[in-house]
Image (tube, grey):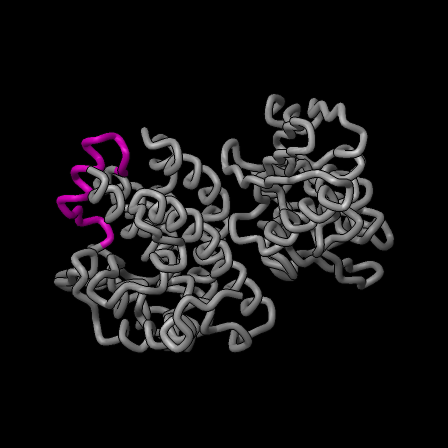
Amino acid sequence: MKEDLFEYLLMLGDNSMILGHRLSELCGHGPTLETDIALTNMSLDLFGEVRSLFQYAAQVKGGGATEDSVAMLRSDREYRHVWLVEQPNTDFGHVIGRQFFYDNYHLPLLEQLTKSKDATVAAIAAKSVKESRYHLRFSAEWVKRLGDGTEESHQRMQSAIDHLYPFVAELYQPTPIERDMLAAGVGADLEAVQAQSLETIEQVLADATLSIPEGDPRMTMGKQGIHSEHLGYILSDLQYMQRAYPNMQW
Amino acid sequence: MLNDYLVTHTLNIDNAHVHEALWAVADPEIPVLGLMDMGVVRRVQVDGQLVTVDITPTYSGCPAMDTMADDIKKELRDRGFEPTVNLVLSPPWSTDMITERGRKKLADYGIAPPMSEESDKMALLGEARIVKCTNCGSTRTKMISQFGSTACKALFQCEDCLEPFDYFKCLK
C-alpha cells in the first residue's frame, strides 16, 4: 500500500513536473510578452503542486528521501508521466494544444482528488484545482482564437491537434496502481475524468472550427516508465545541477 | 466562506511582542501588504519562548512564501523567540481572506483589489468593464493579459488615462 501510494504520487507529480519543465523552457521565448508571462506563471503553478506532492512522496518513502531527491535523482525508467507532456515546444499551436489537453485532464482529476480519503492528497488538490481553472480558461481561449483565426493559424492549430490527440488516450488508461488507489478511495476515477474531459474537448474544438483526428491512439506506456526519446534530453537539462554538483542546495 | 474568512480575523495573539513581529512582515513582492492583512497566518501558538506559526500559501508555487517564512522567523528571533513556521495547505487560501484594510492598501499602491468570483469571471472574460483603474478611477478598462507580473495578478489597462495596472485575481 505504501509503495503503491508512492508510485501514485509520482504519477500525479511527474505529469505536472515534465509539463512545467517544458513550459519553463519558454521563459523569454514566448511569442508575445503576455503569453510568455502566462506560460511561465502556469509553469510555476505546476511546480508548486509538484513540490507539495513530492514533499508528501518523500515522507511516504522515508529513508532520508526529500522533495529534491524524488524530483531530481531518478533514472528515466523511474518517471511515471505520459507521453503527451514531454512533446516538444514545436510552435505556439503545439504549446497551446498540449496545454489544452493536459488542462482538460488535470482539472477534473483534481476536482475528484479533493474528495480523496487521503487528507494530504485532498488538501493539495483543493489548492491546485483553483489554479487549474485559470489554466484551462487560458488554453481553451487560445485554441479558439487560433483555430477560428486566420487560415495560417487554423492550419497550424489543426496540425498540432492532429499530432497531439493520439497521445491523449494514455491519460485515461488506468494502470493497476491507479485502479487500486481508486478502490482504496484515494485515487481518481479516470473513466469519469475522461467523460468530463471529452465533453469539454469536443465543445471547444467545435467552437474553434477544428476537428478531432480519426485513427487509433498511440500505444504508449509512460506510466510504466517507457518514454520517448525526448525524456533523455529533458532530464539532462532538469537534472544537470544535481548530477554535476550532488546534494547542492540554493 | 465566512468561516474561512474568520480564521484570519479571530486570531488571538495575546503576546504583544509576537503580535508586533507578525505585523512587521510584508509580502516581498507587494511590500505595502503585510502578511496579516493578506490573511495567510492560520494559527499562532506561543509557549514561553517557543512560537509556532502556521501559514498557508496564496498560490502553490508562489516564491514569496519561502521569503515570508524566513522573515517571520527573523522578526521573532530578533525579539528573543524560538520560531517554527509550518506551511499548511488546508483549508486553501482565498482572496476573501484579505482584510478590508489590505484591500484599501492594494488599491492605494496601484493594484486593483480582487472582486467577487462572479464579477471576476466577467472581467477576465471581457464580458463586463468593472475593474476600476487605480490611477483615475474609470471603469473603461480592458484586460491585457490574464497572467500578470506575479501568479496572483492579471494585467489591465485603462482606456481613459491609458495607464496599465495590475488586478489581483479572485481565487476561490
Q: Is residue A187 magenta?
A: yes
From the viewer's perspective, is residue A236 above or below residue A172? below
The residue at 44%/52% (across/down) is A51
Q: Which residue: 34% across, 36% down? A: A112
Q: Quadrant of residue B99?
A: top right
State the image coordinates of residue B83 (x, y, percent, origin top left): 64, 40
Q: Is residue A215 visible?
A: no
Residue A3 against residue A120 in the figure, above or below: below
Q: What residue sits 49% from the left and 42% below the top? A: A130
Query: Measuring 77% from the left and 41% from the top, which residue is drawn there?
Result: B79
Closer to the camera in the image, A18 or A213: A18
Quadrant showing the N terminus of chain A: top left
The answer to if A131 sits in the magenta stretch is no
In the image, farthest residue toward the right? B136
Q: Position of residue A185 (x, y in %)?
A: 25, 30
Residue A140 drawn at (x, y percent): 44, 55
Q: Which residues are magenta?
A: A171-188
In the rendered view, would you say B130 is above or below B49?
below
Front in this rendered view, residue B73 or A203: B73
In this rendering, position of residue A17 left or right of residue A230: right
Left or right, A227 with respect to B93, comes to: left
Can the viewer see residue A94?
yes
Counting every numbered tag in the picture gives 0
Vertical side of A190 occupied by B162: above or below: below
Left or right: A67 with respect to A3?
right
* Residue A25 locus on image (x, y percent): 45, 73
